[in-house]
Image (tube, rainbow, N blue to C red):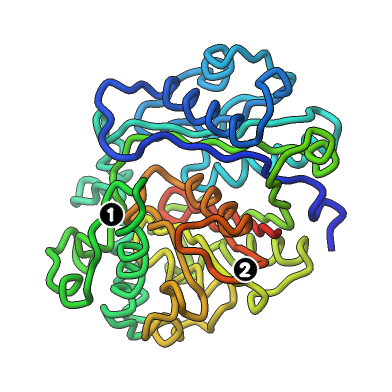
Amino acid sequence: MSTLSGRCVIAGIGHTAFGKLPGREVVSLNVEACRSALADAGIEKSAVDAVFVKAPTSAHQFMIGQKVSEALGIAPRIGGAWDQGGAANITLLSFAVMAIEAGQCDVALVCYADNPRSGNRAHYARPRGDDAAYGWFSTAAGYAMIQRRHMIEHGTPSEAFGAVALASRNHGAGNPHAQLRKPLTMAQYLASPWLVDPLRRDDCALVSDGGAAIVVMSAERARALGVAAPVPVLGFGHGQTSFELPQRATLTRTEAARAAHAAFAMAGARPADVDVAQLYDCFTVTVLMTLEDYGFCGKGEVAGFVADGAIEHGGRLPVNTSGGLLSETGMPGLQLVIEGVRQMRGTARLQVPGAKLCLVSNQGGTMHTHATLLLGN
């Protein structure tokens, strides 16, 4: 077990409303989420000496980390912005842990906000390199290619992808913070319109405005400050590829395997120890391949693993208990960490009884980047 395991905690969590928020700007959303996280931790902003900001996807801003810090009224010792797509949130959390351990800061805010729903969502529809001349546009097109390849190689049926959609949508249906509170049946999923074959509408994440934030500090400092419900960071890991889809040796294996191996090794745990998971569900195929690459089942066996409600609340591995990107909010990644914290505190709306270990995944680009987090209680 790594000496880092359990030495730092998530001391506070916070978020804004999710959905369409006309007139809200990225810095303002970040500030609201950070204030909420500080209040949840029960500490003042004067204790914060690091601010790590995930760069917004839809409207990149130069020096966004400093803009957020200035708006918060904080002059951090260390901080800035990081762009790794949806994997950046767990990456920044791990940077915060390492900076704290290195004595470079004491209390860190990690935050993210974006407003593509009411603002500009053109990034998601951008042309993909030279292949754009042949019609390759949008994020969805790349994931459609990956999903088709998985279906060809492993005979993965549509119902397996539907199982992921049902879990996220049905978990989010009763979440008062969710953007989409509408349950889904398998018949409805199979009847939903095609977006990019074989992707159906219900395979695809929401487009959302919103912000989220967490407070990270050492376990020792949390005790000294009287933090009410700190959640230990037991492990994290990372993996990424530099290659676009046409250059990859395979489309059905991802760097999630490398990221998970590092996280489990740090925590001294294994997949069988996980009680609940918050898995990045930008598209349903992402969850299926993450489950395989994390070692919950073998390649090509995931359809059987997710069948019969196995990943719904009450199943053997509940996944995305607040609704994920398919129901709660499409703003990528940090909301999954926040739900993981709730599960470990025992305060989640769909609480998994007796849960001791939560696995969270973040993923960016078209399965370019991956980050894994293990939380305990």
For this view, does 280 lie left or right of residue 128? Answer: right
Whether residue 316 is visible to the viewer of this picture, yes or no, is yes
Apparent side of residue 331 relative to residue 234 in the rendered image (left or right): left
Question: Disc 2 on helix, strand or loop?
Answer: loop
Rendered position, 377 above or below 87: below
In the image: residue 271, left or right of residue 98? left
Q: Who is closer to the viewer here, 85 or 329?
A: 329
Location of mark 1 (residue): 140
Question: Image quarter for residue 308?
Answer: bottom left
Residue type for callout 2: Ala
Mark 2, residues whose alpha carbon is within 10 Å: few (<14), some, or many (≥20)?
A: some
Q: Which quarter of the picture shows residue 53? A: top right
Above/below status of 276 relative to 245: below
x, y (%) of residue 202? 23, 62
User: In the image, what residue type sits under mark 1?
Assistant: Ala
Q: From the top left corner, tell me how far across and down residue 63 is, in percent.
A: 53, 18
Are dots 2 and 1 in contact, CB under 8 Å?
Answer: no
Instruction: Identify which residue, 110 or 154, lies in the foreground.
Output: 110
Regarding residue 241, the answer to whether it shows in the image is no
Nearest the eye: 263 or 177: 177
Q: Which residue is mark 2?
A: 355
Quadrant location of the C terminus in the rendered image: bottom right
- Expressed as whole percent of the image width and height from the top left, the position of residue 119 reads 26, 28
Q: Is residue 248 left or right of residue 70?
A: left
Distance from disc 2 to disc 1, alpha carbons, whole Å, reads: 34 Å
Image point (36%, 46%), residue name: 177
Residue occupying the point 77% across, 40% down: 98
